[in-house]
Amino acid sequence: MNKKEWGIFWNELKNIPVILEKKTLNIKNNIDLKEIAQDLRPVFLEEKHLLKKMFDLAGDIYYQSVWCTKQGRYIIDGVPFKESVVKRINSLDDFESFREKVLEFEKTEDMIKAESEIIEKFILENRNHMNYLLNSRELDDEGHFIGAYPFIEEVSKTYSKRVNMVSFSGGKDSTVVSHLVRTALNNQSILHIFGDTTLELPLTYEYVEKFKEQNPMTPFFDERNEENNFFEMCKEIGPPSRVSAWCCSIFKTGPMGTTLSNFEEDFLTFYGVRRKESSSRSKYPKILKSTKIDKQLSIGPIIDWLDIDVWLYILTENIDFNFSYRQGFPRVGCWVCPHKGTWSEFTARIYNNTQYDKWEKFLLKFAKDIGKIDYSTYVKEEKWKLRRGGEGLERTKNTIIEKKACINEKNTYILGLNREIDDEFITLFKPFGEISISKKGNIQEMFVLNRLKEALFKIVFKNDSREIKVTLIDLKDRYLYGKITKQLNKFNTCIYCQACNSTCSFGALSVINGKYEIDEKKCVNCLNCINKFDMGCLVTSALRTKIKE
């Protein structure tokens, strides 16, 4: 954690925000400064035009210094804008007419000049702060250099056996990290990987392609889940919610994990995560063993930066960035993300209206299909974002495993499954150890052995049956039955979503072309693929959050 406490103050003489250390600042002697916010982002001409049309502003906002807080409160020439954006959005009568007025905007040379002058003053007044963030060799509370450049150099030397890589999303944070890493290491050939969720904003795809063109020396991987469709997945397990955002594992980390597992090398992955983004990320260390992709050691060179710091770097270095930010998008991730707020939904509806309308129609049908009486209100009030479990979904029935203790044998349970036993059933138990099977007629007895050839458990089943008998042999592992149940959950509900592909560091697990396979030569029986998701399977977890056994 950065040892210094920074404040954002409004410089009335320059009419721009400045970032200053609170401890060394004497406000009484700086009458031209007043603390204005905890964080800010610049508001560009396109967003200014949007505000002008929203509130029918009389003043010429195009020439004013406009900034926005993390809470969505606008500051115009140092004065907080008092009108409620959310109330105004909800009161718009003719949205299509309003949208047309927003889209017809054309910048003039005078507007562009005024914007450039504001940016230049902002850069000039904050140059010392920028220099500190880039070059300081002071140590933070974790013992790492505060300056991004010496930190990147040092961590690259420390983990020199790992392959340097940048996780690139097309957003402002990863854009900055990409530039920082290539500059600090004086190397334009740092591997970049883009996890294409298939749900990015159209301008994000344009920016990614433009980045490739502008940086031909930078190797670039595009990874996407080619076998699954987001809308079809939503039909199966419901749209992602704030409680269960299953989409990232299936459409981002899964495909990326699949690619990285094919490499023998481990990776030093520089990414743009920042602690100020959320309460969960506030606890991230600067160097993190990835919880999503096992081959990664994740490095956060801007982990303590504010939004305004990121923008200061972009504007100082004159880096091209995703045009969506100019339109007013605070963040440019998936346009269907349940974590997006009212403003992001509003801007998506304006600039991404075709896809937004498709999504809204899907949500209305989904709400109706799961039995919501007032389904229109359910969607309008965004209650789908708070969904828990698979209420109303047919596939939820597959998550229930019938269980009873066997009267005749100790530590033995009879379990009823929702799918007939096949070869894939046996495959799911390979991560535990060696499989030994004996047959007596149509009955199969499967022993699972550890590396010492000791039996861990036994499963007895009939071909094409839906009932199994599990006997625990290794009673020292009190979590053994839970681990077995996780694999049974996976067997019951697997839809080959590929989320599991990111769980194996050794490339032993592969979900592709509708098959779940384990390469026994590569598997080291670490059980990461079993323990990764709280119920063993991401789909089961998404469906059973509130379902009782």
Image (spheres, rainbow, N blue to C red):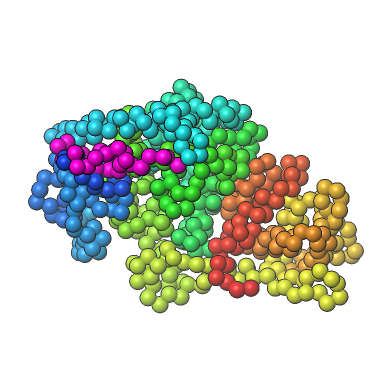
Residue in view at x 13 percent, y 54 percent: 56
Residue 375 magenta-highlighted: no
Q: Is residue 117 left or right of residue 173?
A: left
Rendering coords of residue 118 (x, y %): 19, 35
- Taking the view exactly as shown, the residue that stands out farthest to the right is 440
29 part of magenta stretch: yes
In the image, residue 434 above or below residue 132:
below
Q: Nearer the viewer, residue 508 or 298?
A: 298
On the rendered structure, is 444 left or right of 124? right
Q: In the rendered image of this protein, does residue 532 appear above or below residue 136? A: below
The number of callouts visible is 0
Could you tell me which residue is drawn at 44 percent across and 53 percent down?
279
Residue at (67, 54) in percent of width and height: 530
Residue at 71% across, 48% down: 526
Camera sees residue 48? no
Instruction: Say above or below: 263 vs 537.
Output: above
The x and y percentages for residue 263 are 63, 35
- Give percent across and percent down for residue 466: 74, 69
Res 114 → quadrant: top left
Q: Quadrant of the N terminus?
A: top left
The residue most toward the left is 58
Give the quarter of the image for residue 376.
bottom left
Which residue is situated farthest in the top direction here? Answer: 186
Task: Report the span colored magenta.
Answer: 1-30
In the image, residue 338 sits, relative to residue 36, either above or below, namely: below
Residue 262 pos. (x, y %) = 64, 37
Q: Nearer the viewer, residue 448 or 120?
A: 120
Q: Quadrant of the C terminus?
A: bottom right
Residue 412 in sight from this viewpoint = yes
* Left or right: 433, with 330 as reference point: right
